[in-house]
């Protein structure tokens, strides 16, 4: 019976020490410094392109890729912002189209 009581006491004390080390006051004591707030700005430049026969938005995006990864719907929305008349019609041959080329992300950090 003493062995069961001693084992229970050891497990209880070790649990209390583990909780105090991981979630308690020791882990929070004097280690909190104000970290700078960093914002990432993604921007794009517009590149004018003259289309040829059988061009699609997919083919134009493949020929003129962005410097940074951007999802297709996001890039398509930027395309439609620059060329709003193409929401309701397809690409025509020998027209000038504005292709958005997303640039690398800039990181601006500031102290609180």
Image (cartoon, helix red, strand yellow):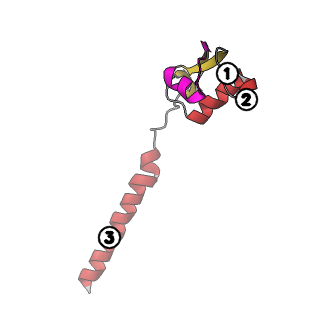
Part of the protein shown in magenta: 47-64
Give 30 or 41, whichever is nearer the viewer.
41
Left or right of 2 in this view: 49 = right
The vertical placement of 41 against 1, above or below, is: above
Real-space Cα separation, disc 2 to disc 1, in angstroms = 9 Å
Estimate the x, y position of residue 91 in percent, counting from the top left.
Answer: 66, 24
Identify the residue under disc 3. 11
Tell whether label 1 touches label 2 (CB within 8 Å).
yes
Judging from the image, what secondary structure is the residue with disc 2 in? Answer: loop
Q: Residue at x 37, y 65 (%)?
A: 15
Give 104 or 23, whichever is nearer the viewer.
104
Nearer the camera: disc 2 or disc 3: 2
Q: Using the image, tell me which numbered label, if any, was put on residue 58.
A: none
User: Which badge, 2 or 3, is on the more N-terminal residue?
Assistant: 3
Identify the residue under disc 2. 89
Identify the residue under disc 1. 92
Give 66 or 21, whichever is nearer the viewer.
66
Left or right of 61 in this view: 16 = left
Crowd around label 2: few <14 · some 14–19 · many ≥20 (10 Å): few
Judging from the image, what secondary structure is the residue with disc 1 in? Answer: loop
Crowd around label 1: few <14 · some 14–19 · many ≥20 (10 Å): some
Give 98 or 112, whichever is nearer the viewer.
98
């Amino acid at each position: 019976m003493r062995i069961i009581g001693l084992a229970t006491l050891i497990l209880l004390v070790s649990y209390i020490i583990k909780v105090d080390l991981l979630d308690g006051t020791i882990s929070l004591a004097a280690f909190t410094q104000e970290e700078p707030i960093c914002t990432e700005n993604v921007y794009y430049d517009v590149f004018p392109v003259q289309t040829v026969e059988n061009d699609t938005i997919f083919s134009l995006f493949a020929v003129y890729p962005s410097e940074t990864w951007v999802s297709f719907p996001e890039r398509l929305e930027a395309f439609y912002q620059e060329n709003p008349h193409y929401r309701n019609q397809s690409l025509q041959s020998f027209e000038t189209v504005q292709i958005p080329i997303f640039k690398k992300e800039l990181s601006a950090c500031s102290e609180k």
